[in-house]
Image (spheres, rainbow, N blue to C red):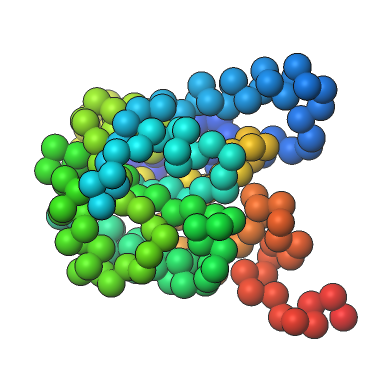
Amino acid sequence: MNTRRNLLGGLGVGALGLLALGAYGRTNERESRQRTLGDKFPNVPVFTHEGKKVSFYDDLIRGKVVVLNMMYTSCGNTCPTATANLRRVQQLLGDRLGRDVFMYSITLQPELDQPRHLKEYIDKFRIGPGWQFLTGTPEDIRALRYSLGFYDVEPEVDRNQFTHTGMVRIGNEPIDRWTMAPALTEPDHIMSAINHVDLRVDHAAWPNPPKDANA
């Protein structure tokens, strides 16, 4: 129970659904806020499963609705189930993926998971296009893990990769609207969390609203 409580504590302010709403306001306020948002996430170089080098904030996060989780290819318990759930989320997103919503998985073992290993993982789980798997230096991945709230407040627990949180971080970066969902929950629940932060979706409670939803 204490471990679970500490895991939740490590998610940080705002990570469990404290949402920043509303318009940006005046131009100077908007510019100031954009600088603050950019400061939240390290703009470190990372490599995709295709071996492409990109900047984390500028290329992957800025101006987007994003879905992020952490995993590693040798994980035999949580990760395969979480990957299967997110694969279903990928299917539910349909053509929104890569246009309105962007999915990223970051390895917890960058010293072992090079791009080719991530590509093998994608092939193993038959993951379709539009969902990127990322690696980098251990120092940069650690900085990303902390900035995204994927850490435990107890150092000994935090160092144990077998106790990683199994959460999905979901956010609308332009308006600083963020939440989290358990990776092991039903895919429809994860979709509802995505729809909740995406202002383009009118019916956040329904991942796939029926055609007569407004009737």
The residue sitting at 59% across, 20% down in the picture is 35
In percent of width and height, residue 169 lies at: 48, 46
Q: Residue at x 12, y 43 (%)?
A: 112
Screen quadrant of the C terminus? bottom right
Q: Is residue 73 above or below residue 159?
A: below
> Residue 186: x, y in percent?
48, 68
Q: Residue 126 occupies which quadrant of the picture? A: bottom left
Question: Residue placed at 47% from the left, 72% from the top?
Answer: 91
Residue at left offset 80%, top offset 82% = 212
Q: Residue furthest front?
A: 52
Q: Quadrant of the N terminus?
A: top left
Give the number of callouts.
Answer: 0
**Residue 155, position in %: x, y?**
27, 26
Q: Nearer the viewer, residue 163 or 180?
A: 180
Left or right? Give the position of 203 relative to 109.
right
Between 165 and 38, the one lying in front of the other is: 38
Res 81 quadrant in image: bottom left
